[in-house]
Amino acid sequence: MATFRFELDHKPTRNKTYNLYLMVTAAGKRIKKKTGIQLKRIDDFNPQCKGNNWIRANVPDAKVLDEQLCLMLAQANDAYQELASDGDVSFC
């Protein structure tokens, strides 16, 4: 079984923003996928959220970003379930 979670890179990019990643862990191996979402401050991300509120409310478009993250999480879970049913799940 795989686990999915979001993680914020604590090292800023050149334009002083922080990248948000989707972490997928399966069979003891971890893969880090870029979500394309960049936040201006580290505190704008809530890793221990209740529900699907990963982005704090003080961020402009927080609801839209949370919906995008929820959709990414659902797509990743569906893809994993489909591959697992075919027996094609493997990590390099």
Image (tube, rainbow, N blue to C red):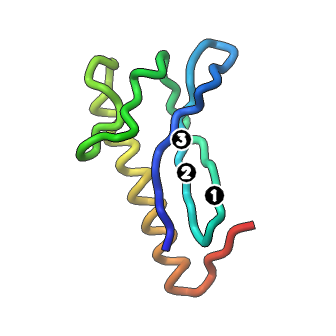
Residue 63's x, y, as percent? 27, 32
Per the image, the residue denoted by label 1 is 30
Mark identifier at residue 65: none
* Residue 16 coordinates in the image, percent (x, y): 60, 13
| Above or below 83: residue 86 | below
Task: Give x and y (percent) for residue 62.
Answer: 31, 27
Residues marked 1 and 2 touching at CB (< 8 Å) = yes
User: Could you tell me which residue is drawn at 59 percent across and 27 percent down?
Assistant: 10
Residue farthest toward the top in the current orientation of the protein: 15
The residue to which callout 3 is attached is: 35
CA separation in Å, label 2 and label 3: 10 Å
Three-letter amino acid code of the residue under disc 3: Thr
In the figure, is residue 37 to the left or right of 67?
right
Helix, strand or loop at disc 2? strand
Identify the residue shown where x is 41% and y is 21%.
Answer: 43
Q: Mark 1 or 2 closer to N-term?
A: 2
Which residue type does callout 1 highlight? Arg
Q: CA distance from mark 1 to mark 2?
A: 7 Å
Quarter of the view holding residue 15:
top right
Pointer 2 or 3: first along the chain: 2
- Report the disc number at residue 23: 2
Picture quadrant where residue 9 is located: top right
Above or below: residue 39 compared with residue 1: above
The image shows residue 19, relative to residue 67, as above or below, that is above
Q: Secondary structure at mark 1?
A: strand
For label 1, the crowd category at 10 Å Cα-Cα, with few meaning under 14, some 14 to 19 and many 20 or more, is some
Look at the numbered disc 3 and give the secondary structure of its residue.
strand
Whole-percent x and y of residue 19?
Answer: 57, 30
Horizontal arrangement in the rendering, residue 82 relative to residue 58 (left or right): right
